[in-house]
Image (tube, grey):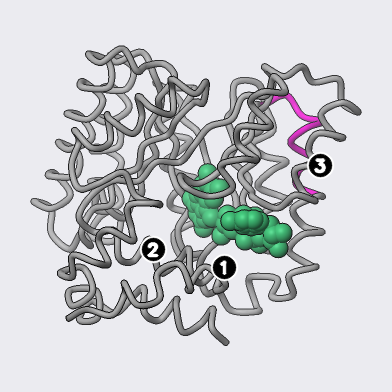
Amino acid sequence: MLRSVFLAAADSSRLGRLVSSATLSKNAARRFVAGDDVADALRAARELADDGLAITVDHLAPETSTAEQAKAVRDEYTELLGRLASAGLTPAAEVSVKLSALGQRIDDKLAFEYALAVCAAAADAGTSVTLDAEDHTTTDSTLEILAGLRKDYPSTGAVLQAYLRRTEGDCRELATTGSRVRLCKGAYSEPESVAFQDPLDIDKSFVRCLNILMSGEGYPMVATHDARLIAIAEDRARWFDRSAEEYEFQMLYGMRTEEQARLAAGGNIVRVYLPYGEQWYGYLMRRLAERPSSVSLFGRALVPG
Ligand code: FDA
């Protein structure tokens, strides 16, 4: 129930404008978002790198409805990648990109062209790009664009969502040499026809997908805060003889930081998903949808005025 309230709030631009303008809510968001601009992202990335963590930086862009906005997102990523390289933060830091921000809903050829430019900037910076997964209506287009990008930039990563019924098949397709796959549960509100709804069914799907990725030839990126799934991933890595360099854990900035440190201290690669940008409101609502108990953390701060 609370989950759907937060997911609806994430899509409400009016509420977003109201909440985003309140200084108190901005301060509350700081625990989960690096700040508004590239300088904030670099500062937070430096701190994470100093703690021995890898990073994937995500720019929280306003919703893209014109080609100009998509171009501005491309330019933002190009600048970000140049500055990450100048600051000596690559290859520890890579970037995560939403194709919708690069114009996928306007024209997927445009999104491909702009994503190609971001991949080129990442290659110049000595790092790579991962394409975030969005709602299920975009999955086919995203995987097609991924295949196109990987012809020139084979290290471009994909994200697969365990809640989608199709994902085991997608894992099989992508568990090949050189392929980087982030496996997560999935963060959107999806219909039963395409997605498991019961949390236990989602967890079981996650484990089946994990088995395929860990036993395959690619590089699995296990994105979860769930202690049980983390333990299962460690077990599967041992079972399939993967060394600590042959897979990684990923968690969101500000979430389970002690667990991030514990895994890194144990010799694991741990990559932190670091968002920055003025459009933090929708991102924060999705996190609250996943973990409504965190609402006490924001509580009064989210009420403007
Ligand atoms: P979930 O939220 O289901 O929690 C399960 C259990 O984990 C809890 O019961 C608790 O035991 C423990 N736990 C969780 N959070 C905790 C906390 N803060 N403190 C203590 N215990 C805690 N989604 C998407 O659709 N597309 C994408 O591209 C991405 N990308 C992405 C990148 C990265 C790096 C991550 C970590 C996640 C994503 N996601 C995503 C989001 C993902 O799909 C999912 O919605 C969230 O990660 C929440 O699911 P979890 O697997 O973390 O566990």
Q: Residue placed farthest to the right in the image?
A: 239
Q: Does 73 appear above or below 289?
A: above
Q: Few, some or many C-alpha atoms within 10 Å of disc 2 (few <14, some 14-19, many ≥20)?
A: some
Q: Which residue is drawn at 19% across and 33% down?
A: 39
Quadrant for ligand 1 reads bottom right
- In this figure, which residue is indicated by the disc labeled 2? 284
Magenta stretch: helix, strand or loop mostly: helix
Horizontal side, residue 170 vs residue 37: left or right: right
Q: In which quarter of the image is the C terminus?
A: bottom left
Question: Percent from the top left, x then y, of residue 42?
Answer: 27, 29
Q: Does 177 appear above or below 13?
A: above
Look at the numbered disc 1 and say if its residue's Cβ is closer than 8 Å to ligand 1: yes
Q: Quadrant of the N terminus?
A: bottom right
- In this figure, which residue is indicated by the disc labeled 3? 231
Q: Which of marks 3 and 2 is nearer the N terminus?
A: 3
Q: Residue placed farthest to the left in the image?
A: 68
Q: Is residue 209 magenta?
A: yes
Horizontal side, residue 285 vs residue 30: left or right: right
In front here: 75 or 200? 200
Report the amino acid beneath label 1: Arg
Look at the numbered disc 2 and say if its residue's Cβ is closer than 8 Å to ligand 1: no
Q: Does 89 appear above or below 42?
A: above
Q: Which of marks 1 and 3 is nearer the N terminus?
A: 3
Report the amino acid beneath label 3: Ala
- In this figure, which residue is indicated by the disc labeled 1? 291
Q: Few, some or many C-alpha atoms within 10 Å of disc 3 (few <14, some 14-19, many ≥20)?
A: few
Write the start and end of the magenta stretch as one range: 208-218
Q: Distance between the residues labelled 3 and 2?
A: 27 Å
Report the amino acid beneath label 2: Leu
Q: Does the magenta stretch include residue 222?
A: no
